Amino acid sequence: MGIADRRIQYETAGLDVDDLLPNPIDLLLRWYHQAEEAGAAEPNAMVVSTLDEQGHPDARVVLARGISTDGITFFTNRQSAKGIQIAHNNKAAATFAWLQLHRSVRVRGTIAVASDQASDEYFASRPRSSQIGAWASPQSEPLGTREDLNDRVEEVEERFAGVDVPRPPHWGGYVLSIDSIEFWQGRPSRLHDRFRYTLNGSVWRAERLAP
């Protein structure tokens, strides 16, 4: 079957006004937990999109590590391509996709640096091998061979042998605030249900969008 010939009907109960919640963060958390219960692989995976200095878009998959009224928190190397782009332009978008449930959520907002305390606490909770990797990998930079990376890992392991691995100064969290958020529920015949929330002062306003 060719890509153009692939057809799947989205048979779901849909999303209607009565299914919405006053605060879309609560609905996002509900959908996340339902995706988790449905056995979705990496239900906290999201695509974060940013712009480089020339205005070219970049997108990559990261793991959300917190969802609250403050926004969506994720962690990364701040010297990576995404970190450099965020420092230049902190406007960003994120997309969750839970294909088993025929659902996706799109978020637009502004990214801010998370607190040192939040970054320290999360880094301390990571497996030691991941902590080592955060020091060893010059994320997004050209790398000669896999052996070069392995050598860097070995050097970091020796450096921190027998002691706790501290958080690298170039590694930490970001919080994507939510200025607008769209909930998409697949329906038959591509007549999907879409609702977009936008923040007006301190009040969220929801409106239905055409599929």
Image (cartoon, helix red, strand yellow):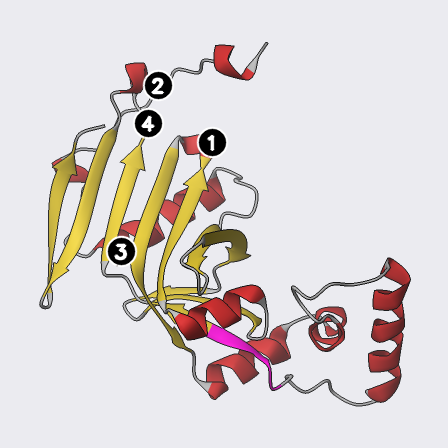
Mark 3–mark 2 distance (CA, rounded to whole Å):
24 Å
Structural distance between the alpha carbons of marks 4 and 3: 20 Å
Dot 2 and dot 4 residues touching (CB under 8 Å):
no
Instruction: State the residue at coordinates (54%, 77%).
Output: 172
Point out the tag, 4 or 3, that comes first from the N-terminus: 3
Identity, as a three-letter code, of the amino acid under mark 4: Gly
Q: Which residues are magenta?
A: 169-173
Mark 2, Cα crowd under 10 Å, few <14 / some 14-19 / many 20+, is few
**Crowding at mark 1 (Cα within 10 Å: few <14, some 14-19, many 20+):** few
Q: What's the amino acid at mark 1?
A: Gln
Mark 4 lies on a secondary structure that is loop
Q: Nearer the viewer, mark 4 or mark 3?
A: 4
* Label 3 residue SS: helix
- The residue under label 3 is 26
> Alpha-carbon distance for marks 3 and 1?
21 Å
Which residue does the numbered mark 4 point to in the structure image? 186
Q: Looking at the image, do the residues carrying marks 3 and 1 touch, with CB atoms under 8 Å apart?
A: no
Q: Earlier in the sequence, mark 2 or mark 1?
A: 2
Instruction: From this view, report whether residue 168 is shown above or below residue 112.
Output: below
